[in-house]
Image: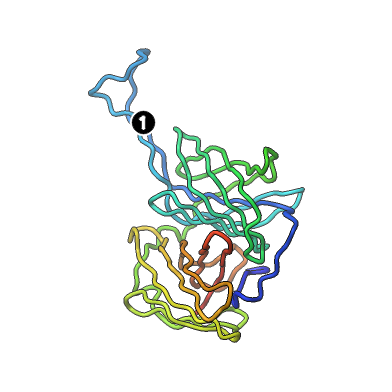
Amino acid sequence: MHKAFNFPLNRYEVSNSMKKSIIAILTTSLFACGGGGESAETPDNVPKATEVMPIGLWQGSAVTDGVTFQIAGLIAPDGEIRFIADDGEQNKGMITLDGDKYTISLKSYNDDGIFIGDGSVSGDYSSTAITGETSHAGEVTSTFSLTVSPESSDGASLSTITGNYATLDGLASIAIDVDGLISGSDDDGCVYGGSLTVPDSTVNVYDISLEVSNCGQFNDTYNGLATYATPFDDSNQKGLIFQVDNGAYSITDFIVK
């Protein structure tokens, strides 16, 4: 993962500029059943259009200021979304559906994991594609296009993610046991705990709670989402990709067995 945000937490540096906001949305399907002529009211015996909360792993690209970035994103059954760009930027939000359109309230973090501002996302989606644009302070900052990842339907299970992991730079090691419990540490002495759980075994998305201690101002519980997959199209390793935050700071990382 290019310019990945890695442990340790206490290497964060605050950035005062927000050059871009890249967003990914994960979506599965929206379907409509039946139809009812010209009447303004649908008869009770005719099924109405049903909105299905998009869940899964999606991948694609976003364009900001003429520059294209790869993006990966996850969405949970409750509508929580997490977006990761290959330049290290991180975003989270909640999706609201309206027919075949959607809106998202967005919180953005820079590549050091520092909160940089609120924004919004809007666009169209189907069972196979998602398009839209990201705005901050009323200004469109990026456009994007996504398709569902083939790894989205791999499913989720604690047996899949059980094992010993390390960050790509070797600065942190993490173990996940058969019950999804996390334990680990890094070269700066930060200690990690927490757990992973499976909200839907048919979709490759996990809930994660990461507890950070012995790490100064970064001590806290961080919550978010994870997936066991390859992070981007040009990646040749499969591992656990996760993004968690506590409101002020966000952690996105890729760890491998």
Q: Position of residue 75 (x, y in %)?
A: 46, 53
Q: Residue at x 48, y 81 (%)?
A: 174
Name the element at disc 1.
Answer: loop
Q: Position of residue 140 (x, y in %)?
A: 69, 40
Q: Residue at x 23, y 23 (%)?
A: 45
Task: Specify the farthest residue to the left.
Answer: 45
> Which quadrant of the figure contains the N terminus?
bottom right
Q: Position of residue 114 (x, y in %)?
A: 64, 62
Q: Measured along the vertical axis of the image, is residue 154 above or below residue 11?
A: above
Q: Measured along the vertical axis of the image, is residue 60 above or below residue 194?
A: above
Name the side, left or right, on which 252 lies relative to 15: left
Q: Residue at x 66, y 64 (%)?
A: 111
Other-residue count near label 1 (Cα within 10 Å), few / some / many at <14 / 14–19 / ≥20 = few
Q: Which residue is mark 1?
A: 49
Q: Nearer the viewer, residue 147 or 144?
A: 144
Task: Specify the farthest residue to the front.
Answer: 217
Q: Nearer the viewer, residue 126 or 248?
A: 248
Q: Residue at x 36, y 66 (%)?
A: 197
Amino acid, disc 1: Ala
